[in-house]
Image: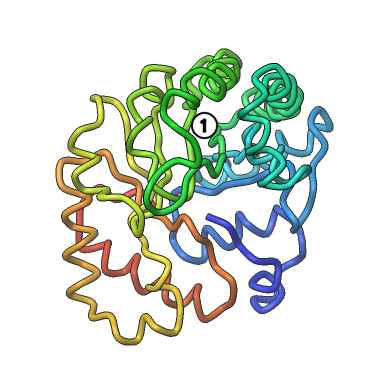
Amino acid sequence: MWIAGKVLSQLGLDAGQQSLISLALKIGADLCFFSYTSPIQEIRPGSGDMASLIKRAHACGLTCGVTVDGPFERAVRDQGFTEVMHLFYKGDALEECLQHYTDGAAEEVAGAVKAGADLVMVCDDIAYKKGLYFSPRMFEVFILPHYRKLKHLVSGEALLGFHSDGNIEQVISYLCQAGYRVFSLEPEAMDLVGLKNSLPRGTAVMSGIKADWLLDSCRGVEDGEIFTYIAALAAGGGTILTSCCGVNDAGGLEKLERIYRLADRLPGWQR
């Protein structure tokens, strides 16, 4: 879950990732995420700072995840979406580009595992609401091999997860085969209840809180509607309740706490 820096200041917390631990405890969460490239506080891989954060969070009883931007995300951020999409017509140039950005992602993935992360979440926005930015075949040939390289860096008890905005239903099976076990996906773009029931055993969906529920428009959404949806998603286990969009202000945080109180009526939630 992405937390805006102003949320921390509104709560009187310091502007640093250590405050994400305090925030997680405040809302009664079981899971806390850090990042090497957080706008709240950047952390250099190999500095030991990530290990210190994770150790502190573990001491508070929190499970720890680290988000890492994937190669496509990094390429788009640096070169622009249109320029990167043009590279799909130039196989060698695309491969060289993605390999460069995979190297950067790999440093962070390896650093997160070494620091003791329980979950590493590769974040690569490769789709819009109706489907992928490219064909499933293009994904299989050009993108998937780099995701496999990142999986090889995750060992021990650490899990590897994947986040993308949009609808990635066409390539979920490829990611499962590559060893990705936790999926953070937009409930607005995908049928998460149906998807969860089709995933292999041992995988989990980490989502379920819709973006509108954290905005002022949430005033028109009844508790019963929210509870019905998260109950359906929770059925049978394999769900970690969280938001894919994050919290932009203290008002959104209050709404998030309300949703978690509703979820407390269900047994076994992680959030």
Q: Is residue 119 left or right of residue 43?
A: left
Q: Is residue 261 left or right of residue 29?
A: left
The residue depicted at 44 percent of the width and 41 percent of the height is 132
Q: Is residue 25 left or right of residue 4?
A: left
18 over 35 or under it: above or below: below
**Callout 1 secondary element:** loop
Q: Residues within 10 Å of mark 1 (few under 14, many from 20)?
A: many
How many numbered markers are drawn?
Answer: 1
Residue 152 spot, x, y in % from top left: 56, 13
Q: How is the image coloured?
A: rainbow
Q: Is residue 134 left or right of residue 3?
A: left
The three-letter code of the residue at mark 1 reads Asp
The residue depicted at 38 percent of the width and 73 percent of the height is 213
131 over 160 or under it: above or below: below
Residue 137 spot, x, y in % from top left: 43, 23
The residue depicted at 39 percent of the width and 45 percent of the height is 131
Residue 151 spot, x, y in % from top left: 54, 18
Residue 105 spot, x, y in % from top left: 69, 29
The residue depicted at 52 percent of the width and 31 percent of the height is 118
Residue named by callout 1: 118
Front residue of 236/126: it is 126
